[in-house]
Image: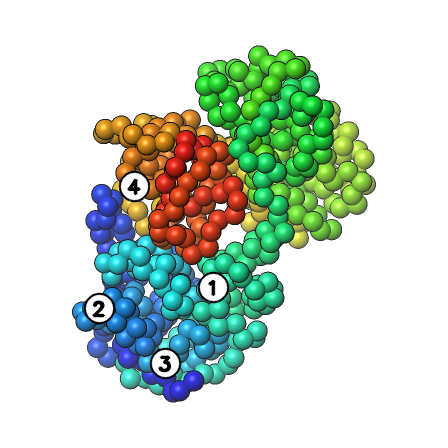
Amino acid sequence: MSEATVVSVNVGLPKDVEWNGKTVYTGVWKWPVDGPVMVRRLNLDGDGQGDLAGHGGEQRAVLVYQLDSYRYWAQHFGRDDFGYGQFGENLTVDGLPDDEVCIGDRYRIGGAELEVTQPRVTCYRVGLRMGEPELPALLVSHHRPGFYCRVITEGEVAAGDPIVKTATGPGALSVSDTDALLYLPDRDIDKLRIAVRIPAMSPGWQGSFHELLDKENAPGPAWDGFRQLRVTDVVAEATDVFSIKLAAPDGGELPAAQAGQYLTFRLPEAVRSYSLSTSPGYRVSVKQEPHGIGSAYMARLSSGSLLEVAAARGEFLLEDGTGPVLLISAGIGVTPVLAMLHSLAGSSREVWWIHAARGPTEHAFAAEAHDLLAQLPNAHEHIYYSSVDGRLTKDKLLELGLPPDATAYVCGPESFMADMQAALTAVGVTRVRTELFGALASLNPGVVGQTLRPPHQPDGAAGNGPLVTFARSGISTAMRDGTLLELAEACDVPARWSCRTGVCHNCITPVLSGDLTYSPTPLEPPPSGQALLCCSRPVTDLILDM
């Protein structure tokens, strides 16, 4: 690598920008600064980030982009209007190409020392800044993302400063190779194993690589669309909870499902999902809601009834291992962790069973869970009734002396899970998995000032395309112009996205039935049975698990 230098130091404070009828609070607009600028732990003086979930912070304090990539994109787009800071970077440099700089490399620049932690987070805002919506995908596919650094030593940096390498990161994993590992297909598993062992790699990217390793051998849905299953029994579990046992109509063996997964049912007037509450086997447990269409229909079933059922799905799964396990639930949130408890039969692992219910009559599976725990040599059982003991709170959880090296699985109302996560973090439990009933929380990075509305039919003229059903949100509507993501937004169905160009996979959603097509083609196709909403449209009636 030839000697590198700083060409420009760029800063800018976040501001509101109008985009597609929304307001985005973003710091992607950066401008060159004359003279030295102090580089601090979280950013440069005079600089800021609008979305601290995806940008900024200790691991992403300084964004670096190189001059050769400026020349490359100028030729690619046929433009000559670029100014330094155009790509949202703090340091425009001559040298430090993405295919040579490695995660963990350290550089002395002026009075500061920086360590490379991850590639740029690929999101829509760099395309917004450049006026090139497809740029997030192009940065990845052309292997020119740029990279973030954390600040080892604070100090002043100015244009013209030489860049001196002071340390080489372990693993020799370049920025462009790291970016490709996350976003492109045909990833090298050996490089994935290297990535999770690089100390300087930002925790967010390390977590993503761990998830990719976990999913590498994960099976897809056992069958496409919906198939018929037969009800073999309906059992009351509490005053407002009942279980339904299912089997193949011909008596044959059903594909194995994993503890923590759920089944989705196509009912006459609704599509509903319910967690499996045993393992192995096909049993779901339903809470009767006063005005619930799904629970009312399920409550009328009897032995011999037939149901349309999609294959088991879900990533709320019990991990293999020997360490302690915390199974924490409230109300009907008990169902997936009860299935996990069944799967731990015969295990010598330390298992903590912590459950909250309103009272004994609303405590479903009390005897079943107690009997299962009695068979485990290292089990701890703690039950909290809000009508007697008050709600299970962070302080009560802290009193239990939970092992900090445990993996926690938490299921229940959103506020309950937030309280439990805060308590677990306070005692040092860092591996926490959660499962939320209903639609997932939305992820709309940088968008501000939106009025939250319950899911509804889209405003304006009705579409004339295939029928799209958002199963968890209870909305069915005809497809209109645009993408499935834009249709979800028009219906205020909670959606998750970042790049909007088929790169980041934040918008990945299970497809319960139907077919779709892509434009543009995503850089890495989603697994079978999943869709990327941001760049897809239905070609048949479609049911999405959202």
**Residue pointed to by mark 3:** 95
Q: Residue at x 31, y 57 (%)?
A: 134
Sequence order check: which comes first, mark 2 or mark 4? 2
**In the picture provided, is 87 more to the left or to the right than 2?**
left
Q: Which residue is mark 1?
A: 180
Upstream in sequence: badge 3 or badge 4: 3
Q: Would you place residue 181 above or below residue 415 in this image?
A: below
What number is the disc on residue 320? none
In the shown orientation, is residue 344 left or right of residue 432?
Answer: right
In the image, residue 304 above or below residue 32: above
Specify the amino acid type for callout 4. Gly
Where does the image place residue 280, in percent across and percent down from the top left?
71, 34
Q: Secondary structure at mark 3?
A: loop
* Dot 3 and dot 4 residues touching (CB under 8 Å): no
Q: Which residue is mark 2?
A: 78
Left or right: 375 in relation to 45: right
Q: CA distance from mark 2 to mark 3?
A: 23 Å
Q: Find the distance from the CA under tag 3 to the CA under tag 4.
A: 41 Å
Give the structural element (helix, strand or loop) at label 1: helix
Report the Cα–Cα distance between label 4 and label 1.
Answer: 28 Å
- Separation of disc 1 and disc 2 at Cα? 26 Å
